[in-house]
Image: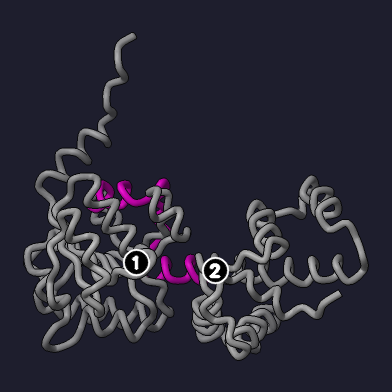
Amino acid sequence: MQPAKPNSLELRRGADAMTTKIAVLGLGAMGSRMAQRLLQAGFSVAVWNRSPAAAQALVAQGAVYADSPRHAAQEADFVISMVRDDAASQMVWTDAVSGAFSGMKPGAVAIESSTLSLNGIRAWLAAAQSHSIVCLEAPVSGSRPQAEAGQLVYLVGGDAALLERALPVLKTLGRAVHHVGSVGSGALAKLATNALLGTQVAVVSELVGLLQRQGSDVAAVLKAISGTSAWAPVSGYLSGSMLAQDFRPQFPVELVAKDFGYVLEATGAANAPALSAVAGVFRSACDQGLGGENMTAVFKLQPSA
């Protein structure tokens, strides 16, 4: 049997990888895995992180370490940021001395993949335009396993033609790329996604707690519920994590709390009483020292049976 011929996207990706230079700013749990995927695909990758030690493994695999976002961006065709919040994004892109915008070459594309507030992404767009930089926002749905496997889902805001140009890069990192509108639409799509997920986490934790306190066969009840239309695909993972007391961080509580803050900033708490209540659950978990644990650790707030 003849081996399958590579499709046009694979041919394009391979050709682009040989000539395309990418800078990755921020090497936390997500950024480090994204940079590794790009290296594995054959791209030339420069990396920067506030703590240089985080770059050592990537440098050993062929990445070039830069001592500032500006230096990382100087030769790059695409500059990708994956940092914690609005403040970190502002620093890596716009700092007068070390910011990436001041170092990018003409025609290079800025890609912001961090989860930012609506005001934060608008400020980022304005700063990019002031430097005559073309840009896409490309936040992702997915956690560490998806980043490692190249299975992220992109929620892209920006010019469609520019997105087409960036597809070989994004398709290396994700299994799906959704163009949701202009810059700002991606941030809203990501915040809505995380708010829905956080709401499911909070509700599942309360229901598992209820079943335990009532002496139910929790596994049997959840299995029955899973056969109904009310069961969300993620609910099995959430309840399994809670029952196994496995709270190793994939999406930490403190980042969910941050994202709920951005959601409420965009909509106003008075317009979102349900989301405000869930935000309070994650704030309480942070107050009780659970911020660094996985989002499912809000289950620890439940009274024991």
Name the residue rendered at 40%, 77% in the picture.
Answer: 116
Residue bounds of the magenta highlight: 166-191
In terms of sequence position, does the residue under pointer 2 or pointer 1 come before the other?
1
Residue 105 vs residue 213: left or right? left
In which quadrant is the N terminus drawn?
Answer: top left
Residue 106 vs residue 275: left or right? left
Kindly identify the amino acid type of the residue bearing the numbered disc 2. Asn
Name the residue rendered at 30%, 79% in the picture.
Answer: 89
Which residue carries the number 2 mark? 194
Residue 240 vs residue 206: left or right? left
Give the image quarter of residue 35.
bottom left
Is residue 4 found inside the magenta-colored segment of the image? no
Residue 238 vs residue 188: left or right? right
Which residue carries the number 1 mark? 113
Q: Tags 2 and 1 in contact by the CB under 8 Å rule?
A: no
Give the image quarter of residue 124.
bottom left
